[in-house]
Image (cartoon, helix red, strand yellow):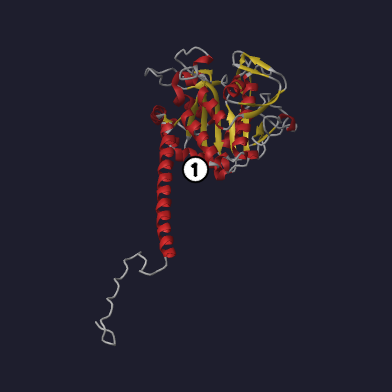
């Protein structure tokens, strides 16, 4: 080619490839594009790394959970005799505290005799619509009918009238669930079993729980020595506090259950008020402790299941998280055992079974004629059950120092 004067023209410069700066273009846009490329690549790597770490944490927590398939299989054998499943979205979860001395960290509490009993049993009712949560303590010494159960060696026990915590010793979780269902008529949807070591780790994961003591405590059996006053208890001390019997109060199991309810209420309150469920750095230690601590049924054996349960609890206001002991009194034939107070116990079971409201009030706030879970016989002149029965108890909003 030539220009108009006939002089050979300069050859046309090659077209720039995609992403390149044309010759003669300023250097600044070129540097900016290179910077943007590396920034995008770096962000992609960070996102992938975070996703990989997140997946690793998820798998670790998920694998911590122990699934109890034995109880699930045993319960299926007795499906026809169990209460029907509820039609609402309400759920009933049986929480069992095992007093086994087997396992790491548990031998210091006594000699392992190869058996275990349910030191603490709580029926947790989560109302439909996340309206409330009601935790009912079942006394370990309550006299109940225990059905025929399969033992660990494959033999069967006979049906018998005995104290409640024998059910766990006879046939483990399945036997305990069947006993509770027979007693209450309430279908147990899920269960969790936790031992001493698991409880301590849960308390440590939330940095301890505050309690108040009127007098100093020195209880060698519970491994507990504490001064009087307001203080924060961590794992070992917290376990001693909820287990102690002889050195706190009147030494009764009923008073110990009240103390356990106060402590659990304070624990729930701390988890919610400290924003644990919304803060990943606080949430992970709690989830790690919880998943290592529990043995649960196949319906709750994944991290997603447990987190959904925790979110359901978070949605419930603390004044609607209620704790009470089933109405009981000393057994007429043995003062060291308990029996149900009727019709108060049946009223409570019916309300939970039908997912209807249950109101709890402190002992001092109960009005004349109201029946509570204080173990006292009913007043024959008291009015019949109201639309919403009232029982002696407390809410998580009260705190252990009130």
Q: Is residue 250 visible?
A: no
Dividing the picture into quarters, in which one does residue 340 lie? top right
The total of numbered circles placed on residues is 1
Question: Is 235 left, or right, of 367 in this rendering?
Answer: left
Image position of 218 with respect to 11: above or below: above
- Taking the spot 52% from the left edge, 18% from the top edge, the residue there is 161
- Taking the spot 71% from the left edge, 34% from the top edge, the residue there is 383
**Nearer the observer, 207 or 224:** 207
Q: Position of residue 274 (x, y in %)?
A: 61, 39
Q: Position of residue 265 (x, y in %)?
A: 62, 32
Q: Secondary structure at mark 1?
A: loop
**Nearer the observer, 332 or 75:** 75
Question: Is 255 left, or right, of 147 in this rendering?
Answer: right
What is the quadrant of the C terminus in the image?
top right
Seen from this angle, which residue lies furthest left?
1
Density class for disc 1 (Cα within 10 Å; few <14, some 14-19, many ≥20) is few
Dividing the picture into quarters, in which one does residue 15 lie? bottom left
**Nearer the observer, 42 or 26:** 26
Identify the residue under disc 1: 87
Q: Is residue 36 visible?
A: yes
What is the quadrant of the N terminus in the image?
bottom left
Q: Position of residue 81 (x, y in %)?
A: 44, 30
**Nearer the observer, 74 or 38:** 38
Image position of 283 with respect to 34: above or below: above
Seen from this angle, which residue lies furthest bottom?
5
Image position of 254 with respect to 6: above or below: above
Question: Is 344 left, or right, of 11 in this rendering?
Answer: right
Image position of 355 with respect to 335: above or below: below
């Amino acid at each position: 080619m030539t220009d108009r004067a006939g002089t050979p023209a300069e050859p046309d410069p090659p077209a720039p490839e995609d992403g390149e700066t044309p010759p003669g273009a300023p250097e600044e846009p070129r540097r900016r594009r290179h910077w943007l490329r590396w920034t995008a690549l770096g962000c992609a790597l960070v996102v992938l790394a975070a996703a990989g770490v997140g997946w690793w944490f998820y798998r670790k927590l998920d694998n911590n959970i122990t699934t109890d398939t034995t109880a699930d299989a045993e319960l299926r054998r007795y499906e026809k005799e169990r209460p029907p499943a509820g039609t609402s979205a309400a759920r009933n979860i049986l929480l069992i505290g095992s007093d086994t001395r087997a396992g790491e960290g548990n031998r210091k509490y006594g000699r392992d005799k190869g058996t275990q009993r349910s030191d603490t049993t709580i029926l947790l009712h989560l109302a439909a619509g996340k309206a409330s949560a009601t935790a009912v303590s079942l006394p370990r010494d309550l006299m109940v009918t225990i059905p025929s159960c399969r033992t660990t060696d494959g033999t069967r026990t006979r049906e018998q009238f005995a104290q409640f915590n024998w059910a766990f010793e006879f046939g483990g979780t399945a036997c305990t669930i069947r006993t509770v269902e027979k007693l209450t008529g309430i279908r147990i949807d899920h269960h969790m079993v936790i031992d001493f070591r698991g409880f301590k780790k849960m308390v440590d994961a939330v940095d301890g729980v505050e309690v108040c003591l009127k007098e100093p405590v020195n209880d060698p059996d519970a491994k507990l020595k504490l001064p009087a006053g307001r203080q924060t208890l961590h794992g070992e001390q917290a376990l001693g506090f909820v287990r102690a019997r002889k050195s706190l109060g009147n030494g009764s199991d009923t008073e110990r259950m009240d103390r356990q309810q106060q402590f659990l209420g304070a624990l729930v309150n701390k988890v919610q008020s400290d924003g644990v469920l919304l803060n990943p750095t606080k949430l992970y230690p709690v989830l790690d402790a919880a998943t290592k601590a529990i043995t649960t049924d196949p319906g709750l054996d994944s991290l997603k299941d447990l987190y959904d349960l925790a979110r359901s609890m978070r949605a419930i206001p603390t004044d609607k998280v209620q704790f009470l002991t089933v109405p009981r009194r000393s057994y007429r034939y043995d003062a060291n055992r308990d029996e149900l107070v009727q019709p108060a116990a049946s009223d409570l079971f019916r309300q939970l079974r039908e997912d209807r409201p249950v109101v709890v009030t402190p002992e001092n706030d109960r009005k004349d004629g109201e029946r509570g879970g204080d173990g006292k016989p009913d007043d024959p002149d008291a009015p019949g059950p109201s639309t919403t029965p009232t029982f002696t108890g407390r809410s998580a909003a009260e705190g252990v120092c009130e």
